[in-house]
Image (cartoon, rainbow, N blue to C red):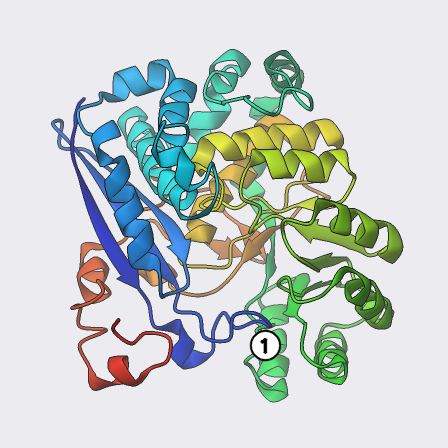
Amino acid sequence: MIIRDIEIIDLRFPTSRTRAGTDAMHPDPDYSAAYVVLETDAGIEGHGFTFTIGRGNEICAEAIRAFSPLVIGRTLEDIRADFAGFWRSLACDSQLRWLGPEKGVIHLALAAIVNAVWDLWAKTEGKPLWKLLADMTPAQLVSTIDFRYITDALTPDEATDLLARQQRTKREREAILLSQGCPAYTTSAGWMGYNDDHVRQLCREALSQGWTHFKVKVGAAPGDDARRLAVVRDAIGPNLKLMIDANQRWEVDEAIARVRELERFNLWWIEEPTSPDDVLGHALIAKAVKPVGVATGEHCPNRIVFKQLLQARAIDFCQIDSCRLGGVNENLAVILMAAKFGVPICPHAGGVGLCELVQHLSMFDYVAVAGRMDDRVTEFVDHLHEHFVDPVVIRKGRYLAPERPGFSSEIHAASRDTYRYPGGPAWACPERDAHPSTGSG
């Protein structure tokens, strides 16, 4: 099966018009995807994407185009035979790596291509991605991972041993997953741009749907944060899990002080309290705010920074992101490192299609790596799922396991036409040029 061509599409959904996705650092997000379709001579397509929030999405699309000569003409069989080598050939291209290395726009572009390859592989096997991963032997799984720069924290032999420990009981957990799904938490009630009445209404609706874990955006004025948390805590009661997310808003000392002010609301974690690159700052915060945990990862650029966060005991919850890291392969590396350090995987999913992708990684983690899900939850954001061929299914606050072959990454052709930027019907209106987040330029 030869990859004959790559279609690259700049997709943007004007979510800023409804205030969805707003937080302390990103007041006007337009959920967007630099979208990839791998076209093959067998007629099967691999779909993948990376996530941005509007302006600059075209830069990701051009970075994907720069990778195209390294992908077009490759066969799926050759990639599968040495997936770690294929991944490294992209991440460590002698000229393109200068634009990272292994971070930033170039790494986001890599993720879109790698995710599309995994979608293609899963479709050819007739399995959803989580099942494809769970069915691999430890040796097969480990062979897909590039261990460069992380062997001081996890070696291939250690990773193989971690997976081997769960082999005998994988099928039992798979049956549990298929019958119960995996636990999730909702961010949909906690966006900063929502007023108190709307937040209260959304909390009540979420409770009626069976949600037990809620996350609220913070980082506004101290009084505003406390007021909004009081609204949520009052609505959900004293015992359900409540988390807060500062989206990198604070200095280290400020984060410690602010969390201490808010801990009276019985918080489970503080997410992204400071710069995502500040490993030592996270370590200081984690020590100072206990028993409130520290969670981060959605802006963690690669496995090396995750390695340092784990080694420094700087995080209590590991928030992998399906598109910020270099696709499935690098996420597998972080999942296995987190298992060695005993830190639960609680993926980030705020963005177009991220729920569809990370559910597969969470389910693989439960079935093949962690062997438990009582200490971990996956984010759910109730936006834009209607655009996907295989959208997430949530029941009583849990993700139900996808059954359709692939990575659940395919967006309907009609949606691709409508939200293609510029020129799709969603952008062909005078409002586009007047809107501060989506104007041409």
Q: Name the residue: 56% across, 81% down.
A: 194
Q: Is residue 415 left or right of residue 272?
A: left
Please state which of residues 61 and 135 is positioned toward the viewer in this rendering.
Answer: 61
Q: Is residue 375 above or below residue 59?
A: above
Q: How many marks?
A: 1
Give x and y (percent) for residue 15.
Answer: 39, 72
Q: Is residue 104 above or below residue 215?
A: above
Q: Is residue 168 above or below residue 103?
A: above
Give x and y (percent) for residue 422.
Answer: 20, 67
Quarter of the figure with the C terminus = bottom left
Q: Name the residue: 31% across, 27% down.
A: 121
Please state which of residues 160 and 125 is positioned toward the viewer in this rendering.
Answer: 160
Please state which of residues 202 and 225 is positioned toward the viewer in this rendering.
Answer: 225
Give x and y (percent) for residue 110.
Answer: 37, 38
Q: Name the residue: 63% across, 52% down.
A: 276
Whether residue 409 appears in this view of the structure is yes
Kind of residue indicated by mark 1 = Met
Q: Is residue 436 left or right of residue 159?
A: left
Q: Name the residue: 28% across, 50% down.
A: 61
Q: Quadrant of residue 340?
A: top right
Please state which of residues 181 and 247 is positioned toward the viewer in this rendering.
Answer: 247
Q: Which residue is mark 1?
A: 192
Quarter of the figure with the N terminus = top left
| Disc 1: CA contacts within 10 A as few (<14), some (14-19) or many (>=20) | many
Q: Is residue 5 left or right of residue 364?
A: left
Whether residue 388 appears in this view of the structure is no
**At numbered mark 1, what does the secondary structure look like: helix, strand or loop?**
loop
Give x and y (percent) for residue 158.
Answer: 66, 15
Q: Quadrant of residue 52?
A: bottom left
